[in-house]
Amino acid sequence: MVGAAICRALESAGNHEILTRTSAELYLRDQKATGEFLLETRPDLVIIAAAKVGGIHANHTYPAEFIHDNLAIQTNLIHGSYAADVQRLVFIGSSCIYPKLAPQPMPESCLLTGPLEPTNEAYAVAKIAGLKMCEFYRKQYGVTYHSVMPTNLYGPGDNYHPENSHVLPALIRRFHEAKESNAPEVVIWGTGSPLREFLHAEDCATGILHIAALETPPRPRQPRQRHRNLHQRPRPPHRPHRRLQRKNHPGSDEARRHPPQTHGLLPHPLPRLETQIRTRNRNYPRLQVLPGPVECQSVSKFISSY
C-alpha cells in the first residue's frame, strides 16, 4: 500500500526512473540476491517500504516471523545500500516503537524509556533496530539515511483480511459485511477506550518524499572495514623494551656461554629445554626461551624471579 502510493507520487512528479521488484522477482530476505541487485542498479535513493505487516492478531500469532523477516529485509537493504555506495535512504517504520505508556502526545525522547505493547513487541523491536541502524550508519559513514515512523495507515491497496488486517480496513470490512447481510450489530475487538491516529497512504507518501529530499550536515566518511573481526582488539602501540642482563642469570649471555651443571642432582643431564614462559613484568618480552641444558632448580629460580 505505501510503496504503491510512493510510486504514484514519484510518477506524478516526473523526471524519476523508478526501480521496483516484486517479492517473486527479488527475495529481500536473501542477503546475496539483495546485495547483487543494489550493486547492479546502484540507485540514487532507496526507500524501504517492504516489510511483513499485520494487525493485532497477526502480530500476536506470528511473532517469530515478524521479527525475523523484518530484521532480514531491512538489514539486507540498509547494509546493501551502503555497500553499493547509495548515499540517500529512507527507512519506513511504525509508531509502535514507542513505549506502551508513553506520554501523549508522544515525544521522540520517550523512545526506549519503557516496555513496548506486548501484542506487537516483535514487530516494534525489529523497527527499532532499523531506526538505530540508519542512525549509526549516518553517524559513522556520513550517509543521508533517514527514518520515518508513520501512524496507522489506510488507503488504496490495503489488506482487508478478516483476521490479519489493520484496524481501519478490518472495521470497513465488518461494516460492509454487516450491511450486506442486514446484521443487527457489528462485533469488534477491544473495549473502545484506546485512541488511534490514522494517516492516508497518499499523504504519507508525500511526507516520505519530503524527508527524502532533506539534507543532513556533511560528516567525514570513515574508511570501510569489511573484513575486520568485530571482536578483534586493536594492537597496542609498539613499546621498545630494555632487556636486563644479570650475571649468571639463566637468560643472560654469560649463562648461555657457560651453561650450569647438574651437580649430581639428576642421573643424567637434562635435554635441551625449549619452554615458553609468560612474564609478568612489562619491561621484559612476553615470551622467553630458556637455554639448555639447565637443572630443575635453575628453572624454578628463573620462573620465580619473574
Image: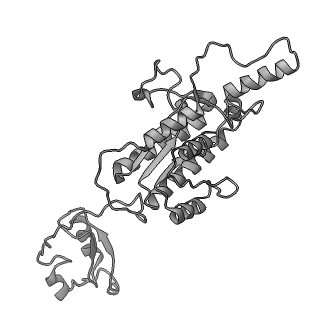
Closest to the observer, 190 or 205: 205
Looking at the image, which residue is at 20% across and 68% down?
238
Position of the C terminus by quadrant:
bottom left
Q: Is residue 91 visible?
A: yes
Which residue is at the front of the view, 303 or 193? 193
Task: Give the left or right position of residue 129, taking residue 25 as reference.
Answer: left
Please determine whether, in this image, residue 253 is positioned above or below residue 66. Answer: below
Query: Would you identify the image quadrant in which residue 49 lies?
Result: top right
Indicate the colouring scheme. one colour
**Residue 167: percent from left, percent from top:** 67, 25
Placement of 116 over or under 14, stated as above or below: above
- Of residues 11 and 256, which is closer to you in this image? 11
List x then y, in percent, for residue 185. Answer: 81, 12
Q: How many marks?
A: 0
234 lies left or right of 43: left
> Eyeballing the image, is 235 above or below 107?
below
Q: Residue at x 13, y 72 (%)?
A: 244
Can you say which quadrant of the picture contains the N terminus? top right
Percent of width and height locating residue 292? 28, 84
Spot the residue most to the right: 181
Q: Is residue 211 left or right of residue 119?
A: left
- Examine the rendering and report whether any part of residue 258 can be seen: no
Give above or below for 293 relative to 41. below
Residue at (62% x, 58% y) in the render: 30
* Image x and y of residue 3, in percent: 60, 43
Q: Quadrant of residue 278?
A: bottom left
Residue in the picture at 58% in, 20% down:
196
